Amino acid sequence: MRLTYRTEEDTRLGALLWEFGPGWRMISSAVLGGGIGEREWVLNAQVVAGYARMDPIEHLTSLGPGGAGVGMLTAASVDRYVQASDGGVDAWATVGLRVPTWAAAPEGAADPELAPVRVGTVNIVVVLPVAMTDAALVNLVMTVTEAKTQALVETGYPGTGTASDAVCVAVPAGGPPELFGGPRSEWGARAARAVHTAVRRGAEAWRLRHLTPPDEAWRRRHPAPPDDPRP
């Protein structure tokens, strides 16, 4: 994974790029390269707040290295990404929580952060070293989402995520496939722990940077994460 910067609308914006090359299958909810299939790269691109372009697929394609890949958008600062590992599983999360949202919101509930094009604010990339069936990949996306929600609830956010989160899971295309990806399967459990750690650290850091100072009781329940040397 590498971090690069570009300038759009007079704003310095970061992008995280994972270049896998051939031999990988991915499942993703991303606007570019979503679904299940063979992909060679993943891009998590930061965009300006209030992003309203109506051509996100073309925009992401222009930012990627070419070929088949997955592209996600976020208004969060991607240079504040958090990475965690567990038993051979690696997870990265970029966390923006200006408007946490409950999944089962009342009909017609407005989200003031949504522009005409929805921009992911909690984006998660997970890489496993084992092949998986399609069903196991779907199961693993469920597990990743549950682990994200657990981290947010534990951190005190009133929501299951944001209205536009995105996820991508990458696994090798060859080898005996795993049949299960649930939270009590071997690899699902590892992915859940890695995602939970990454999202929780990111959520804690977001609160400390953006919200009003919490009270002492909250501080005791949620100690500050270690200092991050990145910008």
Image (spheres, helix red, strand yellow):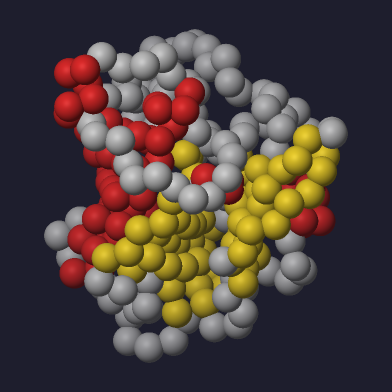
Q: Is residue 206 left or right of residue 53?
A: left
Q: Is residue 43 visible?
A: no
Query: Horizontally, is 149 left or right of 91 in the view?
Result: left
Seen in the image, is 219 located left or right of residue 62? left
Question: Residue at the spot x=20%, y=56% of the render?
Answer: 183
Identify whether 151 is placed above or below 220.
Answer: below
Residue closer to the observer: 92 or 24: 92
Q: Quadrant of residue 129?
A: bottom left
Residue 206: percent from the left, percent from the top?
Answer: 44, 32
Residue 2, percent across and down? 61, 64
Above or below, 214 relative to 73: above
Q: Is residue 175 visible?
A: yes
Residue located 57% across and 15% down the image? 112
Q: Quadrant of the C terminus?
A: top right
Residue 73 in percent (x, y) is at: 63, 43
- Name the residue at 79% across, 49% down: 6
- In the displayed structure image, the side of residue 58 where residue 128 appears, left or right: left
The residue that appears at 44% across and 86% down in the rendered structure is 174
